[in-house]
Amino acid sequence: MSSFVYYKFKSQKDESRVAFDGTGISVADLKREIIQAKELGKATDFDLLILDPATDEEYDDSHIVPRSASVVAKRVPPSRPGKGKAAMYVTKVGRPESNGTPPLPPKERPNLLGQNTWSRNPGPSTKRYDSKDTGQEAQ
Amino acid sequence: MSDSPVLSVTLLGAGQEVGRSCCVLQYRGITVVCDAGVHPAYSGMASLPFIDELDWSTVDAILITHFHLDHAASLTYIMEKTNFKSGKGKVYMTHPTKAVYKFLMQDFARMSAASTDPLFTPLDLSLSFSAIIPISVHQQITPSPGLSFTPYHAGHVLGACMFLIDIAGLKILYTGDYSREEDRHLVKAELPPVRPDVLIVESTYGVQSLGSREEKELRFTGLVHSIIKRGGHVLLPVFALGRAQELLLILEEHWKKHPELHNVPVYYASSLARKCMAVYQTYIHTMNSNIRSKFAQRENPFVFKHISHLPLTRGWERKISEGPPCVVLASPGVLQNGPSRELLELWAPDSRNGLIITGYSVEGTLARDIVNEPAEIISLKGNTIPLRMSVDEISFSAHVDYSQNSAYIEMVKAQHVVLVHGEQSAMGRLRAAMQHRYKERDEDVKIHTPRNLETLKLSFRGERVAKAIGS
Ligand SMILES: [Zn+2]
Ligand SMILES: [Zn+2]
């Protein structure tokens, strides 16, 4: 983990950073790191955008952010209500990180939405992204 | 161009949803934000309004209507973690709101300290707290040239107010959560003496009718009584502050009238509620005549005879579960975690027990789903628990229902009505019903239901602009 990319949410004063190996990180991976760091994985009601700090233009997921660069993150309402894409980035499985360890599932927290799952009416909104669903054995 | 005579209304939250109220008003270069809440179904950053949309250093004033988390709990974050303080913005709330807010946010900070990335620290809280300007109802405040506002009583909870805002001559009434029915301790919402151009109003209950207070209270006390009689425990999940105090007043009175209940304990399992009881006692002068006259006769209505605080010492849940019938008010009302959830999991399998939901249940929370009486619930640990206890819903949440809201909207007589703080379907029905009423009378009133970040731009006729320039 020798490289860093710096980010701050558009309304934030202070920057945070994401560590990785190599000369750059894809926007998709960066989103996953931010979503995990900020424990945003279970919220279904927003999309996360990564913007060029100079132009405010949105980077697409395949764009590579070079190390030591700064970007701006932004939470916006999802394009379809209740269908936010945050969870998508943290459930992508079978993509080992460059240091060989699989990505950790977001830690189970008692006060998050996913807890009220009903055995009788499992719907899309009750999908849980805990260790059972995103099991480390998954490829 | 920031100085154009168009009012923009942008909801950073509570647009076609209930939760994280945050409404941005921009007119003639002045920016006012009404409320700064969190979404009760989420935690951490995901619970914040869409604050990335605004340059917070440009805000002239943030006005907080009441202490409920969905209206006030993102304020600390906004004041300390954005560039708000590099601007000239001021923050206002009423004296009782500020007093309760302090305890509430200390609790909130403690709860979120368990998170790996808490939104703010206790230090952030104390830094921002001293910068909040406490105000009194009916006091006219002028934060900056061209901007003034006056708070009016909103009912709902202690200290709650609506704001009549004047930006360069344009008048906007923002109701926050409000109630038009006097309850045991609060006055009902007032009608400001001037006719605003724009009304921004809550729509929580849409076109639903809630029934009279007397009827609800009878049903409530009757239900509590029958659960006790069948040997059960009564669980009342409530937000620790606000409506809980009204329920305590109702239960105290019922117990007073029924000596056969005197050996049945009523507990509130919240140290936060205990701490804030002093605030309630301090602000009796802001409450209604019922409470004030009792106080004048040297009786303090918030000193209870039949209700006691339950300290949450180790193993308390088991202890009272194994004990005789009792009534417990426990937070949170949404049943997502904490004392109310723990009791629910213990009591759910026994059909003698009863759960009564008394608040508005936000979409995405267990309190919302459990009223459909599923056969089972999943515990926080992931086990399946059969749900055999009775489940009832009686709303004491002190929001206006359809008849009260529609009557109020008509009395205010604003040309534009913006519905906020309601789910899409509830809001849609209310809008349709109001449009129908106005159409029948051939009145031109526009009803808007913007989604989050869907900026509404309103322009006003020439004379309004001319007046605004002259003022
Ligand atoms: Zn409220
Ligand atoms: Zn509210």
Image (cartoon, rainbow, N blue to C red):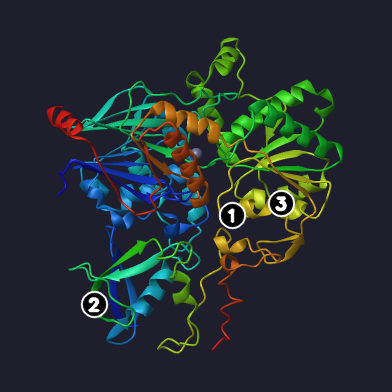
Q: In front: B465, or B24?
A: B465
Mark 2 Cα shell of 10 Å, populated few (<14), some (14-19), many (≥20): some
Q: In front: B421, or B161?
A: B421
Residue denoted by label 1: B365
Gap in angstroms between the C-alphas marked 3 and 1:
14 Å
Q: Does the residue labelled 3 lie within 8 Å of ligand 1?
A: no
Q: In front: B308, or B348?
A: B348
Q: Does the residue labelled 1 lie within 8 Å of ligand 2?
A: no
Earlier-in-chain disc, 3 versus 1: 3
The amino acid type found where label 3 is placed reads Leu
Where in the figure is residue B32, as x and y percent of width and height? 28, 40
Chain letter for mark 1, please: B
The amino acid type found where label 2 is placed reads Ser
Gap in angstroms between the C-alphas marked 2 and 1:
41 Å
Q: Give the residue at x 40% y 89%.
A: A98
Q: Which mark is residue A68?
A: 2
Residue denoted by label 3: B344
Answer with left or right where residue B294 lies relative to residue B383: left
Answer with left or right where residue B40 lies relative to residue B212: left
Q: In front: A5, or B378?
A: B378
Chain letter for mark 2, please: A
Where in the figure is residue B432, as x and y percent of width and height? 48, 44
Q: Are marks 2 and 1 on the same chain?
A: no
> Is residue B315 at all visible to an observer of this figure?
no
- The secondary element bearing badge 1 is classed as loop
Which mark lies nearer to you, 3 or 1? 1
Which quadrant: the C terminus of chain B? top left
